[in-house]
Amino acid sequence: MPVINRFAEMLPEITAWRRDIHAHPELRFEEHRTAAFVASKLEEFGCDEVITGFGGTGVVGVINGKSGSAGKTIGFRADMDALPIQETTGLPHASTIPGKMHACGHDGHTSMLLGAAKYLAETRNFAGRVVLAFQPAEEGGGGARAMIEAGLMDRWAIEEVYGMHNMPGISAGEFAVRTGPQMASPDKFEITVRGTGGHGAMPHKGVDTTLVAAQIVVALQSIVSRNFDPMDKVVVSVCGFRTETATYNVIPDSVQLLGTVRTFNTQAQHQVRARIDALAAATALGYGAEAEVRHMSGPPPLVNHAREADMAAEAALAVSGVAHRNLDPIMAGEDFSEMLLERPGAYLFIGNGDGADLHNPSYEFNDEVIPAGCSWFVTMAEGRLSIA
C-alpha cells in the first residue's frame, strides 16, 4: 500500500490543524487548548470513545473495527507538548505565545495521528480495536508514565504500541527504524557550588564560586574522554550556568550548573554519576568551596522490539519505498520508551527533509510529509488487525 490518496486530498485540512496547534503552543501538562482541539476532532470523526484528562492533560480515542471491539487491540501514540523556546521563523502561523514554540514537531505528530483517526473512523477496514493516545508532557514531564499509570495499557488491553517522530536530515517522507536500542536515557543533574561572595574588585576576600563552577565544567569534560571506551555512546553536557546575581561587580555566594547525561545502560549511568560526584566535590574542595550534586533520572533508553520493528519497517517500505534499517542509535531521549517497557512495539522516524534541527528556534515541521505519516499509521492498523 503506497501513500493513501485520501490523505493527499486531506492535506490542506490536516495542515490547517497542524498550523493552528503550532500557533498556540502549550508546555507540559498545560496542553488544555490542544487537548480540547484533539478531543473535538475525535468526537467529530465518530470515535467510539473519547476520554479527556487522561494522565493529566492527555486524550484517548478508541476506534472499533467492522466487527466491533472483539479481537486484538493495538495502540498509537502522539505527543502534544511544546518547548520553552522563542520562535524565530517569522512564518504566518508562528507561535503567538512568547517564549513557547513547537520546536520538536509534536504539532505534526498530533495532526498526523488525527488524520489517521479520521480515515480509520470512516473506513473501519480492520478487525479489533485501535487506541489513539495523545500524550502530554513528553519534554521531560513524564507524560508517558502518567498515561500508563492512569491505565492506558490495561483499560483497553493494548497488545502492541507504536509511535513516530519526525527527523530532520532524513529525506522527506522516508522512514528509519532499528531493532534494539534506538534512543538514549536522558538524565539530568544540578551542581550547586557554595563559597563566599563579595566585591568583584576584591576577590581575595572571598571564595569565587564562578571560578570554581567554571573549573568543574572543564573537569566534567574528562568523564567521557578518559573513563569510557571511545566506541561507547555516552554524553555529558553542561547546558546551564546560573548565579544569584546579575551585575558586573558582585561575586555570588552560590552558582548552579545544569546539565544532562545520556547513556544506554545502567552501568554507564552509575559510572557517570560517580565521576560527576567525585570531580565536583574534589574541584570545589581544591578552591575552598563546597559542591552539592543532585541527579534526576529520565526515562529509560528506548529499545525497539525486534518483531515489531520489522513490521513497522515493512509498513514504512510499503508506504514510501524507503525504510532505513542501518540507523545508528541517537543520544536524544524519548519517554515512549516507558510504553515499550509495558508492551511490545516500535518507534520509528519519518524524514523531515533539510532544514533546522529539532529544538532550534528556526525549526519548522514539513507539512509535505503528512500524507506519508498518516498512511503509515493506517497501514500498521490494517496490517496488524487484518480482516480474515
Image (cartoon, rainbow, N blue to C red):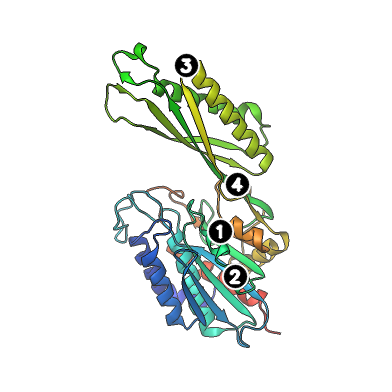
Q: Circles 1 and 3: CB distance less than 8 Å?
A: no
Residue 184 image label = 4
Cα distance, mark 2 to mark 3?
Answer: 55 Å
What residue is shown with label 1? 145
Residue 287 image label = 3
Q: Residues within 10 Å of mark 4 (few under 14, many from 20)?
A: many
Give the number of the mark in front: 2 or 3: 3
Q: What residue type is labelled 1?
A: Arg
**Secondary structure under badge 3?**
loop
What residue is shown with label 2? 75
**Secondary structure under badge 4?**
loop
Q: Which amino acid does label 2 sit on?
A: Gly
Q: Which of 317 and 277 is in front in this view?
A: 277
Quadrant for the C terminus, please.
Answer: bottom right
Q: Where is residue 10 in the image (x, y as percent from the top left)?
A: 44, 76
Q: Position of residue 19 (x, y in %)?
A: 36, 65
Q: Position of residue 186 (x, y in %)?
A: 55, 45
Q: Where is residue 89 in the image (x, y as percent from the top left)?
A: 33, 52
Q: Residues within 10 Å of mark 3 (few under 14, many from 20)?
A: some
Label whose residue precedes the other's in the sequence (3 or 4): 4
Cα distance, mark 1 to mark 3?
Answer: 42 Å
Q: Which amino acid does label 4 sit on?
A: Ala
Residue 155 image label = none
Label whose residue precedes the other's in the sequence (2 or 4): 2
